[in-house]
């Protein structure tokens, strides 16, 4: 590329950039953002706070938040072991829930009320 063509291309790009700059300077949104930035920088220098500290104040990370008080967290009481003894066979089941396979089989065969009667205190 000749020096003259390179000069013309650079001149044209400069004109485009100048037009864009003028358009941006006329934008009221940009002007308000620049004013905000100037005021923010003045406040930061007045209070001796850097940008990272401002961001940390405005958007704290979850680890920086205070943990919930332990009294606020309710915990379930542990389930008690239930003991069932089948009177005919003497088979014994110890379970904390009603999801035991043999217990389900007994309840379907004999009925839930009868099986609950087999429960030991």
Image (spheres, helix red, strand yellow):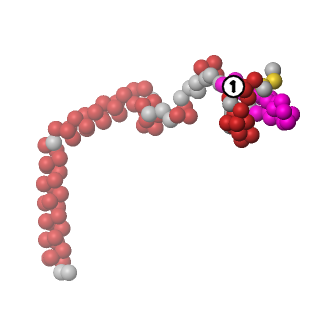
Residue located at (63% from left, 18% from top): 71
Q: Which residue is found at the position 85% from the left and 36% from the top? A: 89
**Can I make out residue 94 in this image?**
yes
Residue 17's image quarter?
bottom left
Mark 1 — residue?
113
Residue situated furthest right in the rendering: 90
**Front-lying residue, 55 or 100:** 100
Q: Residue furthest top?
A: 71
Q: Is residue 28 left or right of residue 49?
A: left
Q: Is residue 63 magenta?
A: no
In this view, the residue in front, 99 or 50, is 99
Q: Position of residue 31 (x, y in %)?
A: 20, 38
Task: Please tell me which residue is depicted at 13% across the width and 65% down the height of the picture.
Answer: 12
Query: Can residue 50 be seen in this snapshot?
Result: no
Spot the residue most to the bottom.
1
Q: Is residue 16 left or right of residue 106?
A: left
Which secondary structure class fits the magenta region best?
Answer: loop
In screen coordinates, is 46 left or right of 67? left
- Is 24 located above or below residue 51 in the figure? below
With respect to residue 17, does 120 lie above or below? above
Q: Residues within 10 Å of mark 1 (few under 14, many from 20)?
A: few
The residue tagged with tag 1: helix, strand or loop?
helix
Which residues, given as a range, are shown in magenta? 76-95
Q: With 56 as the anchor, is 89 left or right in this view?
A: right
The quadrant the C terminus occupies is top right
Residue drawn 59% across and 20% down? 72
Front residue (pair 75, 40): 75
Residue 46 placed where, x, y %? 39, 26
């Amino acid at each position: 590329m000749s020096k003259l063509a390179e000069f013309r291309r650079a001149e044209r790009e400069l004109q485009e950039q100048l037009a864009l700059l003028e358009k941006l300077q006329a934008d009221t949104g940009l002007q308000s953002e620049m004013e905000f930035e100037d005021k923010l920088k003045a406040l930061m220098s007045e209070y001796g706070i850097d940008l990272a500290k401002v961001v940390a104040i405005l958007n704290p990370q979850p680890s920086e938040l205070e943990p919930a008080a332990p009294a606020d967290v309710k915990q379930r009481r542990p389930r008690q072991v239930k003991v069932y003894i089948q009177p005919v066979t003497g088979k014994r089941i110890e379970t904390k829930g009603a999801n035991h396979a043999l217990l389900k089989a007994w309840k379907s065969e004999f009925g839930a009320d009868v099986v609950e009667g087999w429960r030991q205190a």
